[in-house]
Image (tube, grey):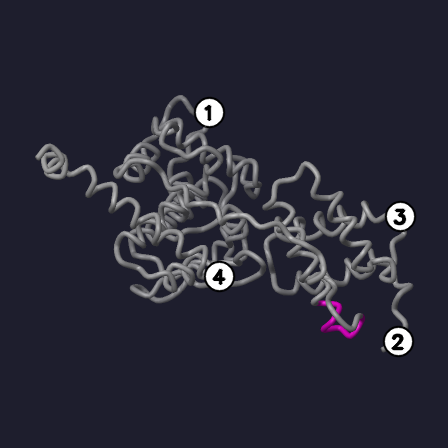
């Protein structure tokens, strides 16, 4: 192995990101990779070379980087650096991955945060499907399509933004949506005719507004016909909650993710196992998927506890 200690760390980061880009991850994922790598490099110093990235230096840098950051953010950065060094090992640039010597935070996988209320998804969809004259430019077809793809296909915000109009494909009765998942992991989610019709209705309404729609066009656009951005999609979902009067049923900090969690929780309630949930939602491990099964078990326990007969037994 040649002496690689003098190679610029920034050059290697650029090579790593280019290799990751081939997997077609979302723009948000690539930006997160870059942010995690450059933030730790900034702590190490200026003009950092590969030879500067010893386990001792990385431990000190991560200790400073962790200050004031949530454990989940530090863990994500650790995972990014682990992938970075894994890439360097495969490329023959370094003999081994030093990240095993760098401590990483332990934190519990966050509990799922579905919408509260058994009928909330139905109320939300019914309300948003109506034209709201208070809006400057109401577009219920688009808004319902966004909600439906999260509630009935479990898409993440970044996955929603990367969808193309040609991402929904297949023969009648075998329709599916092809998703560029988290970490560049693609997946195929089967969709029912009702969701297929909702998406088609939106695309038809978009044609009426802006003309021709090509298969490689990004699926969701704003009222000017420009691709929706992260902030715009988040605002759209929040607006839907307000219009439906269900904002108090949305767990704090969840927003669009609450719809995805609702999809997974209902899957579990209807008997899906953790492996099926893992494949449909694109989870990296079964541990995350298992959380929805555990939530469902807790809900079942709460339902039994609410039985009035049990209270009667308590008075005996």
Residue behind mark 1: 136
Q: Residue at x 38, y 59 (%)?
A: 277
Tell whether 138 sits left or right of 87: left
Q: Magenta span has 91?
A: yes
Of the two numbered discs 1 and 4 in the rendering, the one whose residue sits closer to the viewer = 4
Residue 129 vs residue 79, the one in the foreground: 79
Q: CA distance from mark 1 to mark 3?
A: 49 Å
For the residue labelled by badge 1, is the local secondary structure a helix, a strand or a loop?
A: loop
What's the magenta region? 87-93
- Disc 4 or 3, which lies upstream in sequence? 3
Tell me, for residue 46, which label it has, or none: 3
Q: Residue at x 34, y 26 (%)?
A: 245
Q: Residue at x 36, y 45 (%)?
A: 262
Answer with the quarter of the image where residue 5 lies: bottom right
Answer with the quarter of the image where residue 191 lies: bottom left
Residue 108 seen by the camera: yes
Residue 300 vs residue 26, the one in the foreground: 300
Residue behind mark 4: 285
- Disc 1 or 3, which lies upstream in sequence? 3
Q: Magenta span has 37?
A: no
């Amino acid at each position: 192995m040649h002496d690689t200690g003098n190679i610029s760390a920034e050059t290697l980061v650029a090579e790593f990101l280019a290799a990751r880009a081939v997997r077609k991850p979302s723009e948000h994922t690539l930006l997160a990779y870059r942010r995690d790598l450059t933030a730790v490099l900034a702590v190490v110093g200026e003009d950092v070379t590969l030879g500067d990235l010893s386990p001792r230096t990385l431990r000190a840098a991560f200790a400073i980087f962790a200050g004031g950051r949530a454990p989940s953010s530090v863990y994500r950065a650790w995972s990014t650096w682990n992938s970075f060094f894994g890439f360097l090992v495969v490329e023959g640039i370094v003999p081994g991955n030093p990240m095993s010597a760098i401590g990483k935070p332990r934190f519990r996988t966050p509990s799922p945060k579905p919408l509260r209320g058994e009928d909330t998804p139905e109320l939300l969809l019914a309300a948003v499907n109506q034209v709201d004259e208070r809006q400057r430019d109401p577009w219920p077809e688009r808004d319902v399509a966004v909600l439906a793809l999260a509630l009935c296909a479990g898409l993440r915000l970044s996955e929603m933004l990367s969808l193309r109009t040609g991402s929904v494909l297949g023969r009648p009765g075998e329709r599916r949506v092809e998703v560029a998942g988290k970490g560049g992991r693609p997946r195929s989610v089967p969709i029912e005719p009702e969701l297929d019709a909702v998406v088609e209705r939106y695309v038809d309404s978009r044609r009426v507004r802006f003309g021709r729609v090509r298969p490689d066009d990004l699926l969701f656009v704003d009222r000017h016909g420009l691709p929706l951005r992260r902030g715009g999609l988040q605002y759209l979902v929040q607006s839907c909650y307000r219009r439906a009067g269900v904002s108090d049923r949305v767990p704090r900090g969840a927003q669009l993710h609450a719809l995805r969690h609702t999809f997974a929780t209902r899957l579990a309630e209807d008997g899906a196992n953790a492996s099926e949930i893992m494949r449909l939602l694109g989870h990296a491990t079964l541990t995350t998927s298992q959380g929805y099964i555990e939530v469902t078990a807790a809900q079942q326990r709460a339902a039994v506890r609410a039985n009035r007969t049990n209270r009667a037994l308590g008075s005996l």
